[in-house]
Each structure stands twice: as structure tokens, then as C-alpha cells.
């Protein structure tokens, strides 16, 4: 008996995945690996979107909102840190440019 947990993806994720598939920048297998889904699932989403348009994927998705919030907070903190580092580098560049004159 398999104890594998079924993943549920939000409609936005599915639409974005289908859009990426449609761009053709990557083959379906590579895109599926990067997104962490099966290749056949990408084609299933594509078919559903083509058949139902804006009414495709009526569910809400059941991703863990706490995990999403944690990731958002982590990314915001990293963004602040990188912006601070960027400002320091800009000031250093100005300082050294003045010194070399």
C-alpha cells in the first residue's frame, strides 16, 4: 500500500505551467522536472485549459498557506538584505571613483 501524499496545485500554478509549456523554451519533460510534476499532468492541464478556458481549474488549491507565508517572509528578508548590500556597493563605487580622480 502506497503512503504517497497527493499534491494539490492552485489554478494559478496550473495556468502558469501551461503558459510556460506553450512558450516552448523547454521541452515538457524538463519543465515537468523543474516544476516537480509529471509530464503527463502538464498535458492534462493544457487540455483542460483548452477545453474550458477561463472556467478550467475551478478548485481553490490546497497548498499550505503557512508554508507560503514563511517562504514569502524569507524572500522579503533576503530582498532587504540584498538591497542593503547593493546600496553599500554603490557608495563604495562612488567613493573609489572620487579617489581615482
Image: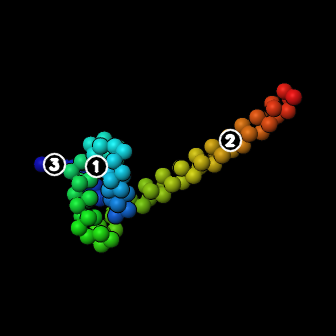
Residue on which the image places disc 1: 37
The CA distance from mark 3 to mark 1 is 18 Å
Q: Are marks 3 and 1 in contact (CB under 8 Å)?
A: no
Mark 1 lies on a secondary structure that is: loop
Q: Residue at x 54, y 54 (%)?
A: 73
Q: State the image coordinates of residue 91 (x, y, percent, origin top left).
A: 77, 39
For the residue carrying disc 3, how many other residues have a C-alpha within 10 Å: few (<14), some (14-19), or many (20+)? few
Closer to the observer: label 2 or label 3? 2
Residue on which the image places disc 3: 2
Question: Which numbered disc flags the more N-terminal residue, 2 or 3?
Answer: 3
The CA distance from mark 2 to mark 1 is 36 Å
Q: State the image coordinates of residue 32 (x, y, percent, origin top left).
A: 29, 46
The front one of 100 and 81 is 100
Residue on which the image places disc 2: 86
Residue 90 located left or right of residue 95: left
Q: Residue at x 53, y 49 (%)?
A: 74
Q: State the image coordinates of residue 60 (x, y, percent, origin top left).
A: 34, 68
Q: Are marks 2 and 1 in contact (CB under 8 Å)?
A: no
Residue 17: tell me if it is visible. no
Q: Residue at x 26, y 53 (%)?
A: 42
Residue 65: tell me if it is visible. yes
- In the rendered view of the protein, which quadrant contains the C terminus? top right
The front one of 4 and 20 is 20
Question: Which numbered disc flags the more N-terminal residue, 3 or 1?
Answer: 3
The front one of 77 and 55 is 55
Q: State the image coordinates of residue 7 (x, y, percent, origin top left).
A: 28, 55
- On screen, residue 16 above or below 99: below
Q: How many labels were placed on the picture?
A: 3
- On screen, residue 94 above or below 79: above
Mark 2 lies on a secondary structure that is: helix
Amino acid at each position: 500500500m502506497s503512503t504517497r501524499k497527493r499534491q494539490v496545485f492552485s489554478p494559478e500554478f496550473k495556468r502558469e505551467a501551461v503558459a510556460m509549456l506553450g512558450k516552448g523554451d523547454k521541452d515538457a519533460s524538463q519543465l515537468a522536472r523543474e516544476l516537480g510534476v509529471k509530464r503527463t499532468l502538464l498535458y492534462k492541464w493544457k487540455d483542460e485549459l483548452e477545453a474550458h478556458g477561463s472556467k478550467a481549474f475551478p478548485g481553490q488549491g490546497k497548498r499550505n498557506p503557512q508554508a507560503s507565508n514563511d517562504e514569502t517572509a524569507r524572500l522579503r528578508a533576503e530582498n532587504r538584505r540584498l538591497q542593503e548590500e547593493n546600496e553599500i556597493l554603490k557608495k563604495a563605487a562612488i567613493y573609489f571613483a572620487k579617489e581615482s580622480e
